Image (cartoon, rainbow, N blue to C red):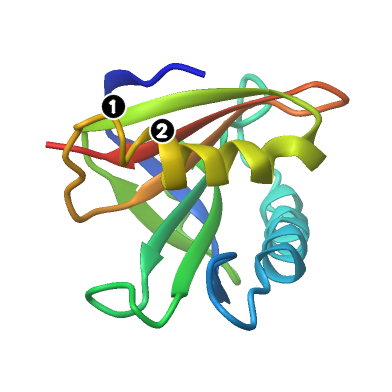
Amino acid sequence: MTIEIQTLPRRTLLGMKAPFITARHEGANGPQVIGPLWDEMSKHYFAMQLNRAEWPLGIGVMWNADEDGSSGEMFYFAGYEVFDIPEDLGELEVLILEEEKYACVTHIGPMSEMPQTVVSFYSDLLPNSGILRRPGFDLEIYEEVGPTTKVVIAAPVN
């Protein structure tokens, strides 16, 4: 697994958010929160029957609930990229990601193995790379979902 520095484009997302506790803290509940959040958000999103040419790009966005991240609580936003914001959002909300620079790794394999990729990236690869993180959104960009999943994991960097 190799880190690539990429400037990711500005994106507008339509989705839902929920708090969760990260894997490195007591009471970790990411799997119990994030999967059901995607299910609930997708139900509302696809019920809107938005005009789109192809399947929308799914993006998970995470940020610390407290300034220094010491509590382990984060927010997870599960959303799909949209090009136009509908007038009636229903249960969904809008999150705009500005164009920013990210350190990225790509997970290719079963979804069940993605947590290992995430932990390796944040606990070993990124801290030992010398690349400086900056405050901001961490991303999971779901490029392909199925038996073999392709997800870009991205941390904001200077």
Residue 92, percent from left and from top: 55, 65
Name the residue rendered at 46%, 69% in the picture: 75
Residue 31, percent from left and from top: 73, 62
Name the residue rendered at 32%, 72% in the picture: 69
Relative placement, left or right, of 25 versus 126 is right
Q: Is residue 1 visible?
A: yes
Relative height, residue 125 to residue 150 (above, below)? below
Residue 137, percent from left and from top: 32, 52
Between circles 2 and 1, the one closer to the viewer is 2
Residue under label 1: 9
Residue 71, percent from left and from top: 40, 82
Of residues 97 and 21, the one nearer the viewer is: 21
Relative placement, left or right, of 141 versus 36 is left
Relative height, residue 135 to residue 30 (above, below)? above
Amino acid found under the numbered disc labelled 1: Pro
Q: For mark 2, does the 10 Å Cα neighbourhood hold few (<14), some (14 to 19), or many (20 or more) residues?
A: some
Q: Residue most toward the right? A: 147
Name the residue rendered at 68%, 52% in the picture: 48
Amino acid found under the numbered disc labelled 2: Leu
Relative height, residue 11 to residue 75 (above, below)? above
Residue under label 2: 125
Relative placement, left or right, of 20 versus 115 is left
